[in-house]
Image: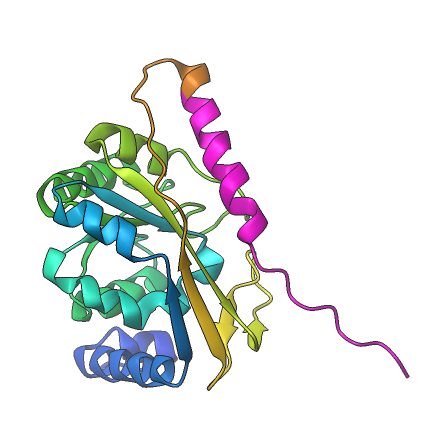
Amino acid sequence: MRIFTGIKDFVTLRPGGFLLYHLVQFYCRTFRLRVENERDWLDHVQRGGAVLLCTWHQQFFPAIRHFQNYHRYRPAIMISQSRDGEIIADVATRSGWQPVRGSSSKDGPKAMRRVIEGLHTSRLAAHIVDGPRGPAGKVKAGVIRIAQATGAVIVPFYTSADRAWYFNSWDRFMLPKPFSHVTLRFGEMIRLEASDDEAAFEMQRLRLESIMVPEMKLPPIPDQRP
């Protein structure tokens, strides 16, 4: 008989994963969600183009429920092999996504190849640009390599909320409060030029980083007035 050592043990079991998925869906339904600038990149996919959606680890949670609308594409997303990653992968699978287990610190090249293969087939994938451990505000090389290998355009997306909690984690993870007004905004399509030159590659990485860093959410400063 398995001894539960906490919620992470419970949700990795089938009944726990089922309950967590529906809890996440129910929680996200409380958001007053507004979606902006989605049509252009969806049209690009419909015309046969490939799109790699990307965001900061800090901001992915508010998009979970809306992203199940893309299930018909069976899109791939790289998720770490940690216990937390196992929980997220289960929610992704139940939402119609194809989790590929791996990260920059473990089985990264193998996982990246599988994402590339999936993107060639489905024409849609997603990527967390700073990975599961950061550092925050640092776009890692994986998103550039995937886009260059597939010819996909990169479409950053950002989430914001008028009321949210910020965790005391490496990225100040954002969790909108129930019934808050949440905005999911897609950026413009970014086309990269394939190149084997390391300097050119780094310039493309820095370009994406410069676009995305201003969209990171800083927790509000507490009111310290007496």
- Residue 77 visible within the image: no
Q: Residue at x 47, y 50 (%)?
A: 133
Of 98 and 83, nearer the camera is 98
**In the displayed image of the protein, which residue is found farthest to the right?**
226
The picture places residue 196, in percent across and down from the top left corner, at: 32, 15
Q: Residue at x 43, y 27 (%)?
A: 204
Figure check: 53 above or below 63: above
Q: Is residue 26 left or right of residue 100?
A: right
Figure check: 40 above or below 224: above
Q: Residue at x 49, y 73 (%)?
A: 175
- Quadrant in the picture for residue 9: bottom left
The picture places residue 45, in percent across and down from the top left corner, at: 17, 47
The picture places residue 59, in percent across and down from the top left corner, at: 46, 61
- Residue 99 visible within the image: yes
Figure check: 127 above or below 95: above
The picture places residue 162, in percent across and down from the top left corner, at: 56, 75
Question: Is residue 194 magenta-colored?
Answer: no
User: Magenta residues, as a range?
Assistant: 201-226
Q: Residue at x 49, y 59 (%)?
A: 58
**In the displayed image of the protein, which residue is found farthest to the top?**
197
Of 81 and 30, nearer the camera is 30
